[in-house]
Image (cartoon, rainbow, N blue to C red):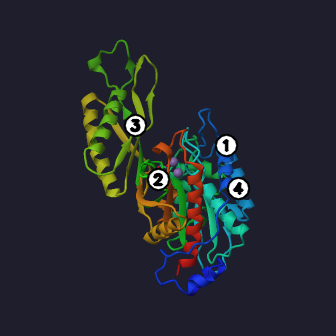
Amino acid sequence: MTSRREALRRLGLAGAAAILPRQLWALPLSSPLRINGERLNATLTKLSEFGRNPQGGVTRLAYSEADLHAREWTMSLVREAGLRTEIDAAGNIVGRRTGTDASRKPIVFGSHIDSVPEGGNYDGDLGSLAAIEVARTIEEHHVDTRHPLEVVIFQNEEGGVVGSRAWSGDLSEQDLANVTRSGKTIREGIAILGGDVSRLASVRRTPGAIAAYLELHIEQGAVLQETDTDIGVVTGIVGLNWWEVTIDGFANHAGTTPMDRRRDAMIAAAKFTLMVNRVVTSRPGRQVGTVGRIAAFPGAPNVIPGKVVLSLELRDLDAAVIASLYDEIVENAKKIGRENGTTFIFKATNANRPAPTDERLRVAIEASARELGLSTRRLPSGAGHDAQEMAHIGPAGMIFVPSVGGISHAPNEFTKPKDCVNGTNVLLQTVLRVDAELP
Ligand code: HGY
Ligand code: MN
Ligand code: MN
């Protein structure tokens, strides 16, 4: 209990220590500290200028000009928060603050600021700016933490949690050669961001190298809004696999080739897309499957497509479910190919492992929310997050706030300013709680 008493003393609550029972994590440890909500929301507005679209959202693809400019501005914010700031060898932005106990591993918190094409202003942005705001609040109030604190803005989350995979050691040579949405390979991207692929091993953190990882994020679904809940406590994060599927047929004249003599790759692609939907929905569970990108070649109105390249994505909380869906899809694709003289080639382009969050952190988040007078609900995350890679290094926890209408990866993604502030205060209180309670 010494550490708890010490923590309470630092927070000006020394008297409370004597009457507190022994169970940790879930107990009141309310600190009067609050983040600056106006400042937080002003930084969200400012960040939304980088890569802004006419529709109001952003296109801030990893390694693009917009990403680079946004990162530069974000780094200045990390410095203003009083943190020692660097770009690590993987291209992640890291800000550090010393703890009072040199033997302790860092408490890490952050998110990402890259976006999908025509994305919104909250996915990743909120968690990143909240992490900086939390660090800044702690610094401004001269709060000593026992653990070192690290704010991290991971690079290329939307391209397959690339930055956090560098930390978990899950980024292979083959991954580095993959072309990401901005048209650059990940290897090129890391150099563009100021990282150094030759030193990639230096960012790797072995299991146990962090005390905890915490991430605030918008829910990107409608559960919290529909149940009128302030704070979501994430139980686990789905695994996600991507394949590039190439369908080869035969390009031919669209006017002279009779319908029964075609080897049309587009027809095979259409059947494939419907088949994926059927396979994924034909069993119980929350698994999802998507064909999100398609290109036909040579790509002219008067040429039968001889080749189609499309993307396949599968997600579930259980990696075995993804594997078995994939097998079934491959079998069915062969059948489609036999029917119209086409062939399918599947190339795996990305795999993120599913991960449960840490029960102690869930409890700590719930206790922090409760003390702030906020309601909570536990839920799984259907979206991928850097937290799932961090969960392989140490305990990981995620805080969700409501997404209006459950809309995300779209320009009208929106989370109310008050919910952004609530989530950030929960993050602050959870960081302090974890710092005080970790044995
Ligand atoms: O695609 C995802 O699930 C996440 O938003 N990166
Ligand atoms: Mn996203
Ligand atoms: Mn995100």
Residue at point 50%, 51% (across, down): 402
The residue furthest top is 256
Residue behind label 2 places its C-beta within 8 angstroms of ligand 1: yes
Instruction: Give the mark, 1 or 3, whose residue is nearer the N terminus.
Output: 1
Chain-order first, disc 3 or disc 4: 4
Relative to 67, say whether 40 is above or below.
Answer: below
Where's residue 308, x and y in %? Answer: 41, 32
Q: Mark 4: which secondary structure?
A: helix
Q: Total number of numbered labels?
A: 4
Please give the residue where the numbered disc 3 appears in the rendered image: 246
Quick check: is the Cβ at mark 1 less than 8 Å away from ligand 3?
no
Residue highlighted by disc 1? 50
The secondary structure type at the circle numbered 1 is loop
| Labels 2, 3: front one | 2
Q: Which residue is mark 4?
A: 75
Q: Hey, what amino acid is under mark 3?
A: Thr
261 left or right of 74 in image: left
Q: What is the quadrant of the N terminus in the image?
A: bottom right
Q: Residues within 10 Å of mark 3 (few under 14, many from 20)?
A: many
User: x, y percentage for residue 174?
Assistant: 49, 52
Q: Amino acid at mark 1?
A: Phe
Q: Residue 331 sits in which quadrant?
A: top left
